[in-house]
Image (spheres, rainbow, N blue to C red):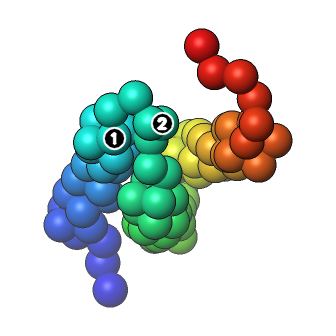
């Protein structure tokens, strides 16, 4: 199955709609902290779509540097973002449970 522009559009849409989900989860809870469940449920979906798109690009067009380099960049940035998200979750939710908030 060839990779089509539809796959790239789905990945692009998921990548850009994810921050909107995170923003919406913060804005509906004024002064009580944010609800992190919508963001936590949406993050794996975005990670799966981006990984799937990058891996398809790497498997089908690995000899083309103009496709291979951005696909590798997406994978590395996704790994970095997932690590940052995990650390933020641990420091804010798990460890910062009783921390004084400004």
Quarter of the image holding residue 83? top right
The residue located at (52%, 45%) in the rendering is 74
- Pointer 1: residues within 10 angstroms few (<14), some, or many (20+)? few
The residue located at (27%, 42%) in the rendering is 28
- Pointer 2: residues within 10 angstroms few (<14), some, or many (20+)? few
As helix, strand or loop, the secondary structure at mark 2 comes to loop
| Residue 59 coordinates in the image, percent (x, y) | 53, 70
Which residue is disc 1 drawn over?
29
Decide if residue 23 is in sight here: no
As helix, strand or loop, the secondary structure at mark 1 comes to loop
| Residue 56 coordinates in the image, percent (x, y) | 46, 69
The residue located at (30%, 71%) in the rendering is 3
Asked whether the beta carbons under mark 2 and mark 1 sit within 8 Å of each other, the answer is yes
Which residue is disc 2 drawn over?
33
The residue located at (30%, 56%) in the rendering is 14
- Residue 73 is marked as none
The front one of 28 and 24 is 28
- Residue at the far bottom: name it: 1
The front one of 43 and 24 is 24
């Amino acid at each position: 199955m060839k990779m089509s522009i539809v796959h790239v559009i789905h990945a692009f849409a998921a990548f850009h709609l994810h921050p909107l989900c995170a923003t919406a989860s913060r804005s509906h809870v004024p002064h009580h902290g944010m609800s992190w469940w919508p963001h936590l449920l949406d993050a794996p979906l975005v990670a799966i779509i981006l990984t799937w798109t990058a891996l398809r690009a790497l498997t089908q067009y690995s000899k083309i540097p103009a496709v291979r380099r951005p696909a590798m960049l997406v994978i590395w940035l996704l790994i970095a973002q997932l690590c940052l998200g995990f650390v933020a979750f641990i420091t804010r939710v798990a460890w910062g449970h009783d921390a004084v908030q400004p």
